[in-house]
Image (tube, helix red, strand yellow):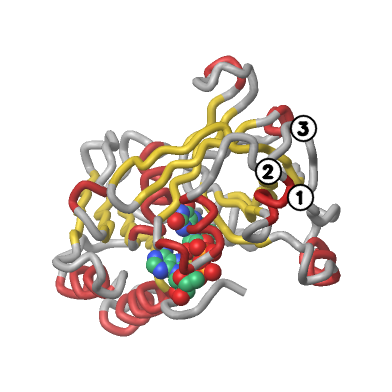
């Protein structure tokens, strides 16, 4: 029997250039940046947790160029195979862009565009953790016209066909992915969903199938280390039995800790768990 692939890769992968159309604070700890552009016409929205590499200018680069409409200064790799990274590393450190990973929170074709420019639009929900990281800082000061580029990576979420129910767990960085999975879910999904957030108002509206129990876990102190509450809660939770599929993402200790718990204490097969460290406490993305 053919081996089931772990991820769902996009059929056609491009480096897509776009520019910021607008941004807004959607809740105390989230900034939604909407980008748009002609090149997004060839972007294929896949729903669920679709993610991409995002290239943004280094801090100061957009101010230095004065944000002139139509001027392209963002240097990006040309390869869309895994060679893109070697090309990226070969660029001089002073001119190469910052690259970070983000999730498609919304996609609208040109005919549904809300910014009135008749171009496709893509929403990204950034956890705002101040100026401690270039991507978070960029989102906080994103200005219409700012350049970005994307490299589509597809889905990590890929439930096993045998799963009778699903466990979806994340901290706030995985909120866009889990909301995307719920937005795309089939009507018969059975799932226990735990999303940890810093503030009750960071919870987002989502329509879930009847068989889904969505638990918003609000940290008692927003500055407590993300992921600890989610891990403790799921450890103590009474969960359904039977073949399952788990998607866990967020701070690295949450993802590895939950996997360890499921495998060691609940005897869940490793192959039924997709665990991803989205970020590491105290460590910038490479
Ligand atoms: C597949 C995938 C999809 C992702 N989707 C999203 C998404 O849609 N929205 C989103 O906000 N994030 C998402 N992330 C996480 C995001 O890529 C990281 O948080 C990234 O490190 C942020 O980059 P930065 O430049 O802001 O900070 P970095 O330069 O990477 O880090 C600087 C400092 O900030 C800390 N830090 C990084 N992220 C956080 C955080 N979330 N909260 C608190 N402190 C942090 C680091 O520990 C470090 O000390 C995703 C990650 C992956 C792998």
Nearest the viewer among 234 and 204 is 204
Label of residue 70 in the image = 3
Answer yes or no: do the residues labelled 2 and 1 have beta carbons within 8 Å? yes
Q: How many marks?
A: 3
Q: Position of residue 271 (x, y in %)?
A: 48, 70
* CA distance for labels 2 and 1: 7 Å
Give the image quarter of residue 250.
Answer: bottom left
Nearest the viewer among 25 and 215 is 25
Q: Determine the residue positioned at 21% across, 55% down.
A: 199
Can residue 273 be spotted in the picture? Answer: no
Residue 212 against residue 168 in the figure, above or below: above
Badge 1 is on which residue? Answer: 74
Nearest the viewer among 255 and 148 is 148
Can residue 147 be spotted in the picture? Answer: yes
42 displayed left or right of 251: right
Badge 2 is on which residue? Answer: 147
Residue 241 against residue 204 in the figure, above or below: below
Label 3: state its secondary structure. Answer: loop
Which numbered disc flags the more N-terminal residue, 2 or 1?
A: 1
């Amino acid at each position: 029997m053919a081996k089931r692939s772990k991820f769902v890769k996009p059929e056609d992968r491009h480096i897509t250039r776009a520019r910021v159309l607008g941004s807004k604070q959607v809740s105390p700890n989230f900034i939604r940046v909407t980008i748009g552009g002609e090149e997004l016409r060839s972007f294929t929205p896949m729903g669920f947790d679709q993610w991409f590499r995002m290239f943004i200018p280094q801090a100061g680069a957009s101010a230095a160029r004065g944000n002139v409409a139509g001027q392209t200064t963002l240097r990006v790799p040309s390869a869309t195979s895994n060679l893109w990274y070697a090309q990226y590393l070969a660029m001089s450190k002073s001119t190469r862009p910052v690259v970070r990973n983000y999730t498609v929170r919304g996609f609208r074709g040109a005919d549904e565009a809300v910014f009135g420019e008749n171009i496709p639009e893509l929403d990204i929900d950034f956890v705002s953790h101040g100026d401690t990281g270039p991507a978070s800082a960029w989102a906080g000061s994103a200005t219409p016209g700012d350049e970005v580029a994307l490299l589509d990576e597809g889905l990590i979420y890929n439930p096993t066909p045998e799963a009778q129910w699903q466990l979806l767990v994340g901290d706030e960085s995985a909120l866009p992915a889990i909301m995307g999975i719920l937005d795309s879910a089939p009507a018969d999904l059975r799932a226990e969903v735990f999303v940890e957030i810093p503030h009750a108002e960071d919870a987002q509206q989502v329509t879930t199938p009847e068989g889904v129990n969505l638990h918003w876990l609000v940290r008692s102190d927003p500055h407590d280390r993300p992921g600890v509450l989610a891990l403790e809660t799921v450890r103590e939770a009474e969960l359904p039995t039977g073949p399952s599929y788990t998607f866990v993402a967020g701070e690295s200790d949450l993802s590895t800790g939950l996997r360890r718990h499921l495998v060691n204490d609940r005897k869940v097969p490793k192959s039924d768990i997709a665990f991803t460290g989205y970020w590491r406490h105290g460590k910038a993305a490479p």
